[in-house]
Image: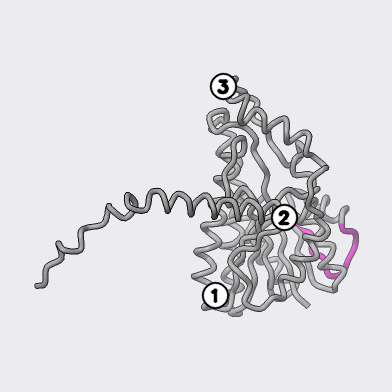
Amino acid sequence: MKTWFITGASRGFGLRIARLALERGDNVVATARRAEAVADALGANANLLALPLDVTDETQARAAAAAAVARFGQIDVLLNNAGFGLLGAVEEASANEVDRVYRTNVFGLLNVTRAILPHMRSRRSGRILNISSIGGYRGAAGFGVYSSTKFAVEGLSEALHAELAPLGIYVTAVEPGYFRTDFLDASSLSVSPNGIADYNGTAGAVRTRAVDLNHGQPGDPDRLARVLVDFAEASNPPVRLPLGSDTVAVIEAKHASDAAILREWRAVSISTDFPHDTATAV
C-alpha cells in the first residue's frame, strides 16, 4: 500500500489518479483549494484524506504535509499536478497574469516539494511526479509564458533527479500532450484579454485553434492515469516521461531541428573556447 499526496485533485488528471489509486487500495491525500470539492468528487473512503491547499501558500503546504504524515505515517508518491495555462502572446500577457501563473505552476510546486522532501529523505524513499507538458519541451506561439513555467518545471525536475536519486528518491517530469480534460476550458486556461493585432497570425491563430481543439484532444486521460499509477512502481524511473503521440512527435522534431542547428553552427559554437595552444605549463 502506497500513500499518495496529490495537488489539484478536484478535477482533471489529479482526480482521475486519486480515484484510481483509491480503487487499488492505496492511501490518498487529495488536496485542492477547497477540500469539499475533493470530498464531493471522490466520496467517503477510509483511505482518503481531503485537505485544503493553496499551493502558493508555503505555510499551508507544510501543514498539509504534516497532516498527511500524521494520518498515514508516510508519503510515498508526491504528484505535483496543480497548475493552469495562460494563452496569449508574450507581449500581450500582463505582469499580473505572468506573476499568477508562475506563483502556481513554479513557486507552488516548489512550496509543496520542499514541504514533503524532509519526510521522504528521513525514510530514504519516495517518488515525485511533476506534471510538465508538451510545452515544457517546446515553446510555441500563444503559450510562451505558460511554456516558460513548464520549462522551469523541467529544469527543477532534472536537478532534483540528480540530487535525490542517491537518497532513494526518484523524480520524473511527466510530459502530457493534448489530453481530453478541461485544460482548455476557462477553469484551467486563462486567456489574456489584451489582444494585439500584429499577433493575429501567430498567437491569435492559436486562440482560435484552442477553441476548436477543446474536447477533441487525442489523449485519453483515463489511460494516462493508469500509466502513472503503474509508473509509481517502476524500478529506475526516467527523469522524463513523454505521454501522447503528439508529445513524441514534438520531441522527435525538436531533436532533428536542434541537430540541424549544431551541424550548421558548430564551428561558430566551439569558436568561443580559449585556443588550446594558449595553455602553458607552469
Q: For residue 127, which quarter of the picture?
A: bottom right
The alpha-carbon separation of the residues under discs 1 and 2 comes to 28 Å
Separation of residues labelled 2 and 3 (CA atoms): 32 Å
Estimate how packed mark 2 is, as few (under 14), some (14 to 19) or many (20 or more) residues with alpha carbons within 10 Å.
some
Task: Provide the residue designation for mark 2.
Answer: 245
Q: Which residue is mark 3?
A: 198
Q: Residue at x 73, y 48 (%)?
A: 178
Do we see residue 106 in this rendering? no
Q: Quadrant of the N terminus?
A: bottom right
From the viewer's side, name the closer residue of 36 and 265. 265
Q: Quadrant of the C terminus?
A: bottom left
Q: Which mark is residue 206?
A: none
Amino acid type, callout 2: Ser
Residue depicted at x 68% and y 44%: 84
Query: Along the line of sight, which residue is nearer the eye, 12 or 3?
Result: 12
In the depicted structure, whether residue 249 falls above or below residue 20: above
